[in-house]
Image (cartoon, rainbow, N blue to C red):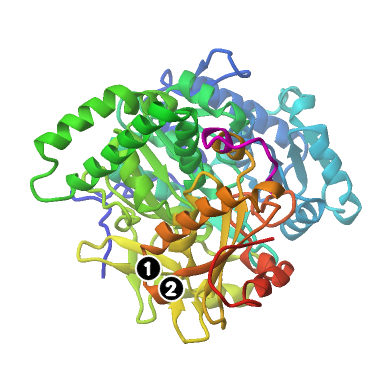
Amino acid sequence: MPGTPATATADPLADAPRNVPGLLARRLERDPEGVLVERSSGPGTPWVPLSVREVSGHVTAVARGLVARGLQPGDRVAIMSRTRYEWTLLDLAVWAAGAVGVPIYETSSPEQVRWICSDTGARLAVVETPAHAAVVAQVRDDLPGLTDVLVIDEGAVDALVAEGRDVPDSEVARRSALAGPDDLATVIYTSGTTGRPKGVELTHGNFVSLALLGVDGLGDVCARPGSRTLLFMPLAHVFARFIQVLCIPSGAVLGHTPDTRNLLPDLASFQPTFVLAVPRVFEKVYNSAEQKAGSGASLRVFRWAAKVAIAYSRAIDEPGGPGAALRAQHRLAGRLVHGRLRAALGGRAEYAISGGAPLGERLGHFYRGIGVRVLEGYGLTETTAPTAVNRPGLVKVGTVGPAFPGTRLRVDESGEIWVAGPHVFRGYRHDEEATRAVLVDGWFRTGDLGTLDEDGYLHITGRSKEIIVTAGGKNVAPAVLEDRLRGHPLVSQVVVVGDQRPFIGALVTLDAEMLPGWLANHGLPEMDVTAAATHPQVVEALDRAVSRANEAVSRAESIRKIRVLDTDFTEANGYLTPSLKVKRALVLRDLADQVDALYVDTREGTDRA
C-alpha cells in the first residue's frame, strides 16, 4: 500500500508541540530575531521585515484584546478579509486566546455569511472593510450569538491592542497551552461546487503534523536558508492557510499581497523562492507572456522558445537526457525568452507548487523547461491541504506525486482514492451522516478517481460524481479535456457535457482579459465577447484548440461539438467558487437549454450561443 514514511532517521512528530501556538513558541525560542514576515503597506512600497519576536508580540497583544472582550476558550471568531498581514495576525491571535478561527471568503454573499456564522455559532466577526461589515449587517438579525463586528480598515487591530492592555501575558500563555492535538482549530467551509457548503473541522494536530512533516520531507523547498513565499491565494482557502502555518517551523519568510492585479510587481519586489497557486494562475502567466510577445518575429521567437522549453523538459525524463543540439537551443532560448519569464515570478523562484486542479502536462513541462520546477500536488480541505506532492528529486510531470510525508494512499477497485494520515479531518460539523460516509476504518474516501504507478505516484483522472456516461455506454472523465482546452488564451472556462447523450460536447466561455490582445495579434478589430463568440476566425481558433485537446483521448471520448457562451462563469454570477472551481451542477441546471442545443442538430462542429 503506497505511502511515504515520516522520515528515514527520526520521527519529526516525536516531540511535536500540542497546538499551533506551540509552533510559534518553539520558533521564538529557536530564532527570536529571525525574520518571519515581510510587510508592505501597498504597491511600490518597500517590504519591511518583522522578526519572530515582533510578530509574536503582536499576536500576544491582539490576543489580550480578544480576552478583554470576553472571548472564551473554544469560542468561534469569523475572519472575512483579503490576504494580508492582519489575516495571519488575527488567526494566530485567535489561537493564542484559545479560540477557533472561522474563515469566510471576502467575496461571500450575505446568505453564505449567515450560514457559516450560524453553523459555527460565531461570537465575533472581524472583517476587512465597511463593505464587508455591511454584508454581515444584512443577516445580523439572524445571528443572535454574534456579539460584535470589528473592521480592520477602521482600526480593529489597534482597538484590540488598546483594550487588552490590562490583561496579563500569563493569561494568554495559559490559554495558548489549552488546546491539544485533537481539539478544534478551525472550521473551513467547502467551496460548495454542489449543494450547501459543509463545515470541515480541522484540529490543531492536523495542522501541526502536516507542517512538521512538510518541513521534514520538503525542506529543500520551504526550509532552506533564504526560503520565502508570497501569499496571494485567499487565506480562507485551506491551501494558503496551511502555508501560513508551515512558514512558522520551516523558517521561511512570509509575505502577503491582497490584490492580484498587482501580483507581477509584488512578485518582482518580494522575490519569492517558492510560489503557490492554482493552475489558472500559471495559465494566465503563460498566456499573458505570449500576448506581450505581440506578433510577427517576436511571437515566433516566443513560441519557439516555449516549444524548446517543453522539449527540453520532456527529454529530462528520457534515457540519456537532452542531446547536444537541444541543450544549445535551450541555452539560446534561455537568453532570449526564458530569463524574462522567470523574472515575471520575481527572478528567484526555484519551485512553484500547484494545486486545486490538474495543471496539465504542457504547462508542467513548460515551467520546468524555463527553470521553475512545478511541484504539482493534490489535497482537499478535508486533508488540511496537501496529501500528495511531487518531490524536488523526482518530478513526474502529469502526476500529483507520491503520498505526502506521513500519509498513506490507496486506490480501490472502482478507481476511487482513499487517504489516511494525521492530517485527515475529524468530521463535518453537525453532519454525522456525511462524516460516516467518508471516514471509514481510519481512511478518508475522497470521491476523486486516480491511479498509482509503480513508484507510488498518483495520477488524478477525475471525480466519481463527474464521470460522464454517454448514450453508447462510454465512461468519460471530463477533467483532462477541460484542462487542455482551458490552456488556450481565448478560453476562460470549459464544462464538458454528454451524459446519456450521443457524443461529448462542451460549453466554452471566452476570457475577456485576454481577448483584446489576441485580436490585435491576429490582425482583427476590437470587439466584445458577444461579437467574438460568433466571429469566424475566433470560432476557427477554438476548433483547432478542441482538436489539440482531443489528442489526449480516444475518439469516443473526444469533444465533437462546442457551444461558445457570451458570458463567463464568475464568482459574481455564482458559477465559480472562490477557489476558481466551476459549479458544474449549477451550470448544467441553469444552462440546460444551451446543453440541449448542442444535440438539436447532431452534426458535429462548433456551435455558439
Residue 414: image quadrant is bottom left
Q: Is residue 13 above or below residue 419?
A: above
Q: Which residue: 9% across, 50% down?
A: 319
Residue contact at pointers 2 and 1, CB within 8 angstroms: yes
Q: Which residue: 69% across, 66% down?
A: 586
- Please tell me whether mark 1 sits on a helix, a strand or a loop: loop
Residue 330 image position (x, y, % from top left) = 22, 32
Dot 2, how many residues are within 10 Å of its Cα: few (below 14), some (14-19), or many (20+)? Answer: many
Q: Which residues are magenta?
A: 519-529
Residue located farthest toward the bottom when viewing the structure as drawn: 472
Disc 2 target residue: 557
Q: Is residue 151 above or below residue 17?
A: above
Disc 1 target residue: 553
Residue 26 in the figure: left or right of residue 350: right
Q: In this orientation, which residue lies closer to the viewer: 563 or 209? A: 563
Most common secondary structure along the magenta stretch: loop
Dot 1, how many residues are within 10 Å of its Cα: few (below 14), some (14-19), or many (20+)? Answer: some
Any part of residue 185 in sight: no
Q: In this orientation, which residue lies closer to the viewer: 284 or 416? A: 284
- For residue 394, the mark is none
Residue 362 image position (x, y, % from top left) = 35, 49
- Please tell me whether mark 2 sits on a helix, a strand or a loop: helix
The amino acid marked with disc number 1 is Val
Residue 43 in the figure: left or right of residue 125: left
The amino acid marked with disc number 2 is Glu
Residue 437: image quadrant is bottom right
Q: Which residue: 80% across, 55% down?
A: 114
Which quarter of the image is occupied by the C terminus? bottom right
Q: In this orientation, which residue lies closer to the viewer: 102 or 322? A: 322
